[in-house]
Image (spheres, rainbow, N blue to C red):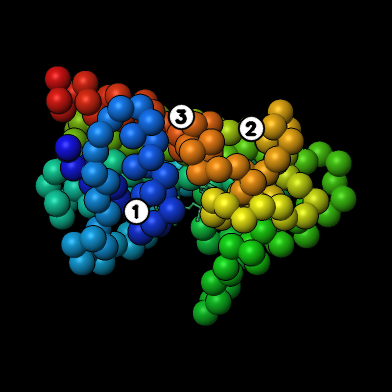
Amino acid sequence: MGKIWFATGNEHKRRELAEIFAIHDAAHVVNIPSDVGINFAPEETGSTFLENALIKARTLFAIVKEPVVADDSGLCVEALDGRPGVLSARYGNTVGKNLVDAEKNRLVLKELGNNPNRKAHFVCAMVLFLGDDRFFAVQETLEGEITCEKRGQGGFGYDPIFLIPELGCTVAELSPTKKNHLSHRAKAGATIGRVYDAVLLG
Ligand code: ITT
């Protein structure tokens, strides 16, 4: 079984990517920096998901000098001009106070208020980084709507307020396996898994 570096500090993302690879028969152990005591918190200074994914990938590649996968993702709400967007992880933070997921969800619901336009999408930019001049990048979305109140216990982040209209449930009401078949990360990870196997395993 191959080992893949995943440049994240987010344990939810690691679990999801491992299952996504498994679903697509890309059998890999997904290692993250904290597994080997690497303190990993690069400054995400990019203005796009792709730029931030590349920053994370480059930072870990410089340390481990092996192929690295990185993911930058977030929620874009149409009526909020695309916010929280690339700031999804830091949404509503002020100096000295970082909001937890439930508070970020409440903030989105408050900002959106009774606006009838509930359209939103998740974005996942994912890169497979093999060197400064050699990398593969994909960006995928999951389309949906913002609910009026949170629903469900699964997933993480904004999943409890993100409704998939065709299924009539929020992402937090899906089983992990169902989410890992249809999410923004599921689609990006399926492609990156295939590229990894094609390029690195022949
Ligand atoms: P790393 O940077 O260490 O990978 P992070 O959680 O800070 O971890 P991002 O910078 O990509 O990751 O921020 C993404 C945020 O967007 C994340 O913290 C969630 O709040 C939200 N998010 C991303 N994917 C999500 C998903 O599948 N479901 C719900 N919320 C998600």
Residue type at tag 1: Thr
SS for dot 3: helix
Tell me the distance, in whole angstroms, between the alpha carbons under discs 1 and 3. Answer: 18 Å
Disc on res. 8: 1
Disc on res. 143: 2
Tell me the distance, in whole angstroms, between the alpha carbons under discs 3 and 2. Answer: 12 Å
Residue type at tag 2: Glu
Mark 2: is the Cβ under 8 angstroms from ligand 1? no
Mark 1: is the Cβ under 8 angstroms from ligand 1? yes
x then y, percent, for residue 196: 24, 29
Q: Looking at the image, which residue is at 60% across and 42% down?
A: 174
- Which mark sits nearer the N-terminus, 1 or 2? 1
- In contact (CB < 8 Å): disc 1 and disc 3: no
- Relative to 96, say whether 31 is above or below: above
Q: Looking at the image, which residue is at 19% across and 23% down?
A: 199
Which residue is tagged 3? Answer: 187
Residue 52 seen in render: no
Disc on res. 141: none
x then y, percent, for residue 148: 80, 51
Tell me the distance, in whole angstroms, between the alpha carbons under discs 1 and 2. Answer: 24 Å
Q: Looking at the image, which residue is at 26% across and 62% down?
A: 34
Viewer-nearest residue: 45 or 192: 192
111 with respect to 20 (left or right): right
Viewer-nearest residue: 61 or 162: 162
9 with respect to 27 (left or right): right
- Which mark sits nearer the N-terminus, 1 or 3? 1
- Relative to 10, say whether 164 is above or below: above
User: In what quadrant of the picture does the N terminus appear?
Assistant: top left
